Amino acid sequence: MKFKIYKYDNVTSSNDIAIELIKSKKKLSGCVCAKFQSKGRGRYGKKWISKKGNLFATIFFHLGKKYPVFNEFSLISPIIVSDVIKKICTGSNISLKFPNDIFLNGKKVCGILQEKIVSEGKNFLIIGIGINVISSPNLNDRYKATNIFSETNKKININEIVDLIIFSYENFFKKLNSYNYKNFKKRADLISVN
């Protein structure tokens, strides 16, 4: 599977655009990237604070019959994305707080929002990914937020991160025959925090 990139300056949310591309434009897969989101969403209707310079992307695809089920992707996606962050932030501590947060050195750096929709009888998975690249919000939360620049002192090009995410998902689908949920579960358990 190949993921074509759809770039936008301003969107309500990258997940909204993915849904529109599936329903109106009949696209089966792709990756939506936006510079700014006016209504970024987190879980349970929470707002995802979308500061310019950070990454707002959504991977979407038709859930084929031979693919893992929707629920398994709630473990697969954080592993794929955390591996990308690990490549960029070498030597840093990466951990997961399920179901949708990735931590960098004990602070939240990424959120993932997965949604499933049905269009024309087909199931689609929509995976929204927000990564704090150069800035991070003050969360009124028990967890602090951080960003890649603060933790590594590296200025990373967003296109480079998007390319790594796409490559990682394409690679996952290329190796689907060797997919084993238990292996992903073991890896997730090793880096999970409460």
Image: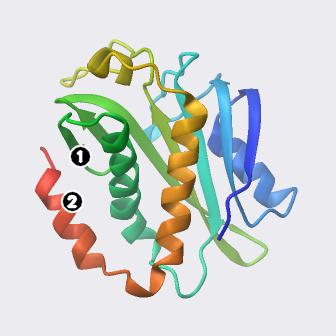
- From the viewer's perspective, tell me whether residue 107 is left or right of residue 66: left
Give the quadrant of the C terminus: top left
The numbered mark, 1 or 2, whose residue comes first in the sequence reads 1
Determine crowd level at label 2: few under 14, some 14-19, many 20+ residues with C-alpha closer than 10 A. Answer: many
Q: What distance separates the C-alpha of mark 1 from that of mark 2?
A: 7 Å
**Label placed on residue 188:** 2
Task: Give the percent coordinates (x, y) of residue 34.
Answer: 67, 31
- From the viewer's perspective, tell me whether residue 107 is left or right of residue 112: left
Any part of residue 84 in sight = yes
Type of residue at label 1?
Leu
Type of residue at label 2?
Ala
Q: Quadrant of residue 77?
A: bottom left
Task: Give the percent coordinates (x, y) of residue 85.
Answer: 36, 40
Count every numbered label the image shows and give the total: 2
Give the quadrant of the N terminus: bottom right
Q: What is the basis of the colouring in this image?
A: rainbow
**Label placed on residue 96:** 1
